[in-house]
Amino acid sequence: MQWPTHEVTNQVPELENYNIYTSDQALREGVQRGQAHWNEENLIRFGAELGSKEVLALGEQANRHLPELVTHDRVGNRLDAVEFHPSWHRLLGLLRQEGLHALPWMQPQAGAQVARAAGYFMQAQVEAGSLCPTTMTFASIPVLRNEPKLFSMLEPKLFSREHDPRDLPLEQKKSIMVGMGMTEKQGGSDVRTNSTVARAPAGTGRGADYLLTGHKWFFSAPMCDAHLVLARTDAGLSCFFVPRWRPDGSKNAVLVQRLKDKLGNRSNSSSEVEFQGAYGIMVGEEGRGIPTIIEMANYTRLDCVIGSAGLMRQAFAQAAHHARHRSAFGKRLAEQPLMRNVLADLALESEAATVLMLRLARAFESSGDPLERAWRRIVTPAAKFWICKRALEFTGECMEVWGGNGYVETGPMARMYREAPVNSIWEGSGNVMCLDVLRAVERETEGFLLLLKQFDQAAAQHPGLRTLVHALRTDLATPPEQRETLARRFVQRLVLAAQGALMLEHAPTPIAEAFIASRVDPDCGRVYGTLAASALQQRILERAWPV
């Protein structure tokens, strides 16, 4: 019985049954620009499916019913299995059916990386944990393709669009997922300190069988059918393909010690494991494990950028939807001048993140061009640093738009806020990314000069952007011993210059100029809601959220 003490009013309806793709003008324009128009019909269909009430509920369910580790069966046999709620497998099935685990290699053509990035960006708005095994599978394919014998056996299962949740030997699976295991207790990002060892019972070298002994402190998605793992041989760190099951059909000696109790990304199991003579196949040259597996990291870092940009887009959509339905002090929140300033500023940040992630995806389609290589090798880690960090304060601001309703776990904002930090940490934290940018600038000198030239051309008619590019050139003149200290400042300028140039090229000119002006003006600070051009704010919001 409900006591008739009051009537429920001024509460906001759920944001559901909308099309995540067609409601995002910047995304649609980027898909066309990136030559992925051939996949737009699929993206429209997928956007409607992801925005449905049923699918949006899957994200909440997968994070409420957490994965559970089952180490042994009833009679004591070792299982090392992780059990998931059915919503988890539904989410993985959605990713798989769209080919987001392998699309550029399944359908190699112009725009394939952009088409895949757009789909991944949209699923990131529904649930982020399921992206992890998908990303690692995606990133493993360029590495495994260099091993023809192994890849010929794996290719049909890697390219399958059917999710197969069964825990079986590789030969019996319809499809497989591949994870990665790099970090150990003593090293973290410094994988050169890894102590796990690999011993060859017979022949040695590329393609040979090895037995691994040691541990991994972070072993993502342990229910993947195999992992790429770093272990030490006499020649140094090498890379190994370690399946969950041995070729003879017995379970491999990868013992899951426990699951990590994480702040966010809770639908996805992360674990600690011990290798007790675990079977593995050497991938790549012996002693060249880091260069071999870093090929994976280049792709997973791109996905960190895409995932964080998707999280920002969904947080903004939720904030804008809330502000258009909630009233305070006699007006809708969206009609309040200061709230409109905040929302417009958030919209600019989200669009700039979207155009950057799509530009990076396009760069991954061109291997030989030095300018494209610079976008891929220099700007990707820079964007990974900046976009993933911005997602933290961005989701916090969007949660604040909701007020107290945003702070409770029954709504979507708290989960997004808890989800935001992981991409900034995973695949190299901020300092690692900034140092990687400095190294890449030194190695890709020709490409970096072409990048600066491109920024100069974009900045020719814009004083704010010229100031940023000039500061970049000044930073390059810093003595080498000081560059590491100033690396974060340099990388921040680099990303803002890239975003400013892209916005000038692709967004309506007044909107691009509002973004640049607010990002180079020190009086704007780093909080949202400090835009000066009040007359433009409604136009920004109408472009960003036409729903």
Image (spheres, helix red, strand yellow):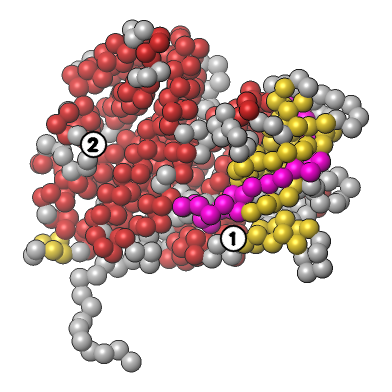
Q: Residue at x 26, y 44 (%)?
A: 346
Front-lying residue, 443 or 358? 443
Q: Residue at x 62, y 62 (%)?
A: 68
| Horizontal arrangement in the rendering, residue 297 relative to residue 509 (left or right) | right
| Horizontal arrangement in the rendering, residue 497 relative to residue 234 (left or right) | left
Circle 1 sits on which residue?
A: 67
Crowd around label 2: few <14 · some 14–19 · many ≥20 (10 Å): few
Q: Decide: is 16 above or below 99.
A: below
The disc at residue 526 is 2
Q: Decide: is 542 above or below 318.
A: above
The secondary element bearing badge 1 is classed as loop
The secondary element bearing badge 2 is classed as loop
Q: Decide: is 283 above or below 449.
A: below
Residue 418 position, x and y percent, is 41, 52
Quadrant location of the N terminus in the rendered image: bottom left
Q: Please check the rendered image and state whether residue 280 is part of the magenta-colored stretch, yes or no.
A: yes
Q: Earlier in the sequence, mark 1 or mark 2?
A: 1
**Given the image, on which type of amino acid does mark 1 rest?**
Pro
**Given the image, on which type of amino acid does mark 2 rest?**
Arg
Crowd around label 1: few <14 · some 14–19 · many ≥20 (10 Å): some
The part of the chain drawn in magenta is 259-284
Residue 38 seen in render:
no
Q: Residue at x 69, y 41 (%)?
A: 215
Front-lying residue, 498 or 119? 498
Q: Residue at x 72, y 45 (%)?
A: 274
Residue 143 position, x and y percent, is 67, 30
